[in-house]
Structure formats: structure tokens, C-alpha cells
Image (cartoon, rainbow, N blue to C red):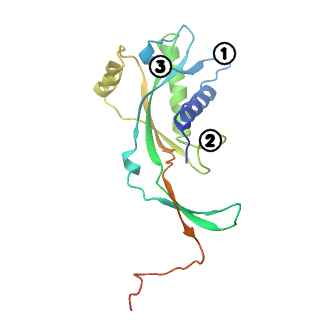
Amino acid sequence: MGGTDVVGDVSELLVRVLTEAVKDPDSAPVVELVDLVAGQSGGGQVGLQLFLYEVTEDPSARNRGPRQTLVEDPVTGAVHQETRRADMALLLRYLLIPVGGGPAAQQHVLGRAMRALYDDAILRAAGMSFQAGESLKLRLAPLTLDERAKVWWAISQPYRLSLNYEVRVVNLASRDMSAGAPVSEAAVGLGAAGAES
């Protein structure tokens, strides 16, 4: 389950992956997280800008049932069952924009980034607010030119060469939980209680 830092952690992870991908012995392309609404633009140095433009609930992960876990009270040693509402599954959408240099340099750095995100389309990150075993799935969003232009129009910027990536399933932990009575015995059964065969 991810804490409230999970969105920032995903952005930080993408910057690290992309920075490693675009390393070049002849130059040092820069990868940075930007706010295009504030009007930032790339300087003369070749690099990539990563802009988070949409955070939404992932519809493919809706209606997940509550999670039930057994928790031991550290003082009494009693085992209680906790029921926690399913994590909110997020879908993050990013623009990946090449900057600096000429068109050839921008296309080169964009190609390196695409290869890295294709090769590592499933990311796992240690030391971040992700649950052990949790992974992020990256996908180049299949947007038409018109749909991409609408993204640029929405942030009041002229259209530029860019890629749209989706990151899913980012889990944001719910604080909604309830504790059940202490577990006194375990039982496994099939069918309805009291039903006769």
C-alpha cells in the first residue's frame, strides 16, 4: 500500500530510470520533473522534461473487495482481524518532452527514453512508499495527434513533440479500517452454514 507520497515517489522513480537511460559518454542530458503550466521551457542543453498532467482513479482496478489481515496486539498478544478498505488505485499520465539541441538530438534522446521504458515496462522500487512486491506498469498511451494536441491546449502551451505515458496501478492506501473480535479459532468450510448435503 502506498502512503500519501506515492505520486511523488513514482515521478522520482521515472526521473531516475530516464536519467540512467539517456546517459551518453559525450554529453550529460538532463532529465527533470517540470511544471509546464508555470511556463518552464528547456534551455540549450539536450534532455527530457517529465510533466505529470493527470492523476485519476484507475477504472480497471475499481470494485476491489476489502483486505482482511490478522494483526497481533503487541501488549496482550491477542490476534485481531483488521478489515481495511481496498487501496485507491491511481492512473498517472505523464508527458515526456525532449528539449534542447536540434531535432536530431531531441529524437535521439527520445529514442533512448522510449527503449528504456519499453524494456522496463514493469518497475519495482525499493525504498519508496510502495508495498513489497508491488509493481508499476508503464505504457505508451496510444493517443491520436488530435488527443495529444488537446493535452497541450489544456495547459495553454503550443504543441511540441512529446510522448504520453500511463503509469498504473499506483496504490494509495485507505485509512478506513475496522478491527474485528479477537480470533479464537480457525475454521475452514464450504457452502452455506447449516446446509445439509
Mark 1 or mark 3, earlier in chain: 1
Residue beneath the point at 36% across and 19% down: 155
Relative to 120, residue 107 above or below: above
Give the Cα separation between the discs numbered 2 and 3: 24 Å
Q: Which residue is mark 3?
A: 35
Judging from the image, what secondary structure is the residue with disc 2 in? loop
Relative to 85, residue 51 above or below: above
**What's under tag 3, amino acid-wise?**
Asp
Question: In which image quadrant can residue 193 be found?
Answer: bottom left
Relative to 94, residue 173 above or below: below
Q: 10 Å neighbourhood of mark 1: few (<14), some, or many (≥20)?
A: few
Question: In which image quadrant can residue 152 be found?
Answer: top left
Residue beneath the point at 69% across and 65% down: 76
Mark 2 or mark 1, earlier in chain: 1
Image coords of residue 30 (percent x, y):
59, 18
**What's under tag 2, amino acid-wise?**
Ala
Question: In which image quadrant can residue 27 be found?
Answer: top right
- Label number found at residue 183: none
Mark 2 or mark 3, earlier in chain: 3
Q: Nearer the viewer, residue 144 or 51?
A: 51
What quarter of the picture does the C terminus occupy?
bottom left
**What's under tag 1, amino acid-wise?**
Asp
Judging from the image, what secondary structure is the residue with disc 3 in? loop
Image coords of residue 99 (percent x, y):
50, 15
Residue lying furthest front in this view?
Answer: 76
Judging from the image, what secondary structure is the residue with disc 1 in? loop
- Label number found at residue 125: 2
Q: 10 Å neighbourhood of mark 3: few (<14), some, or many (≥20)?
A: some
Image coords of residue 20 (percent x, y):
63, 28
Give the Cα separation between the discs numbered 1 and 3: 28 Å
- Label number found at residue 26: 1
Residue lying furthest top in this view?
Answer: 44
